[in-house]
Image: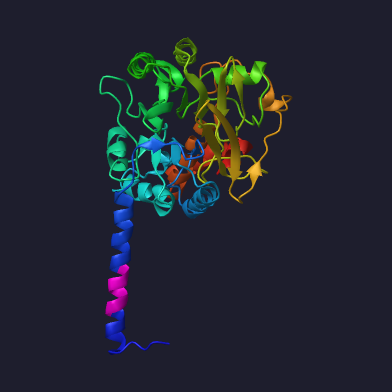
Amino acid sequence: QRRVHGGPKVVLKMVSRCVIVLALCASVAVAQVDHTLRFREDGTFRIVQFTDLHFGEGDGKDPKTQDVQRAVLAAEKPDLVIMTGDSVSGFAWDGKTKPWFAPLWKEFTRPMTEFNTRWAYALGNHDHQGDLTQDEIISLDQTSPLSLTQKGPADVDGVTNFVLPIYQGEEVLTNLWIFDSHDDGCLGVGGWGCVRPNQVAWYKSLSAKLTQLRGAQVPGLSFFHIPMPEFMWVWNEFPTVGNKSEDVSCFAVNTGLYAAMKEVGDMKGVFCGHDHNNDYGGPYYGIDLLYGRKTGYGCYGPPEGWQKGARVIEITANPFSYRTWIRQEDGTVVDQPVSQKTGGPMVKQSVCAGAAGGARSNCEAFEEAYKLKMALDRPTGAMQVSVKSLLDRLSDETRQML
């Protein structure tokens, strides 16, 4: 062994310098990230969909979610991660702590930073319930050189409306469309948010412009948080794979997004989250509609017997095709079986959960129960008794979510 002379102080100085050099090298590596998405030499491009991470609830859940993320990233080595909303549980914010979102952002993006993996962020309904607005969240996200997240046009509703092209050489062969599905209500109608009409118009207009610019229509895949109503119809009427263990909490108003996709003709697949107990998918008149697999340990779900994980999408460039699978937290791959459609939420559904005439959504039930629990943990006296009586009236199913 080589002996280091000069005693412990010299050794510590040398170690400190080594750490600084390594940190500088790491920062340079991240700073040199290529923001242009390109197919690999074998003509493929791999995406991991992390959905419903739900950081911020405490109880040791966040480190477990990071372990899920790391396991998936290590197994898949994706070219891009797309987070389809609810990366934090904004309802868990106490209304006082600041900064609240920013430290959580560092934690839920840490696994991608460790793997030097680029990502894009589609906002969900819970992300902005904390101390930052939607616009502030995306400004923060854009501070990372690994983030490809963009702010959409100021005159279009929502923040995360953008398109990411994937190149082969100098030619764009696939477009990834990101939409902001908002939070509660759509066009003044109660229920869940939606991709609004001017967003649909933006998509149709931009797709036409890109087709004209490139001289040919480019196939696309789209990613957003809240599913559109057609997710009910594909389950009701078409062969699917995977599981439906809760009602679909879809747009309060059908704003014509699917119809626009059919009319334009470029969209091949739609990927959503929001409903933690669903991971099914299938073709609906030529466009595949698929849920991701819930990734996070926060909030409710997935059901007992399922693992947390992620949907993986691997695109082949020319001719366009893609295949998809579920990667679980233990490293295994799920070969999704043909869906069984009998009993409970597996029967046909005609009204979006959370809308008038529809079932109560699990998301809404969990948020209410969590807020009641927070109130019970803080006050004393008569208010505590009142909150406890409300908790006692929760259904057994909702109480178990906590």
Residue 191 among those drawn in magenta:
no
Quarter of the picture containing the N terminus is bottom left
Looking at the rendered structure, the number of numbered marks drawn on it comes to 0
Which of 296 and 70 lies nearest the eye of the viewer? 70
Residue 16 among those drawn in magenta:
yes
| Residue 360 pos. (x, y %) | 55, 26
In percent of the image, x 42 and y 43: which residue is there? 92
Image quadrant assignment for residue 321: top right
Q: Is residue 126 above or below residue 375?
A: above
Q: Is residue 1 left or right of residue 133?
A: right
| Residue 347 pos. (x, y %) | 69, 21
Q: Is residue 313 left or right of residue 340?
A: left
Which of 371 and 140 lies nearest the eye of the viewer? 140
Image quadrant assignment for residue 148: top left
Q: Is residue 284 above or below residue 91?
A: above
**Residue 380 makes an appearance in the image:** no
By secondary structure, the bulk of the magenta-drawn segment is best described as helix
Quarter of the picture containing the C terminus is top right
In percent of the image, x 48 and y 41: which residue is there? 370
Magenta range is 13-19
| Residue 320 pos. (x, y %) | 52, 26
Colouring of the image: rainbow
| Residue 261 pos. (x, y %) | 47, 15
**Residue 263 makes an appearance in the image:** yes
Q: Is residue 6 left or right of residue 364?
A: left
Image quadrant assignment for residue 14: bottom left
Which of 128 and 145 lies nearest the eye of the viewer? 145
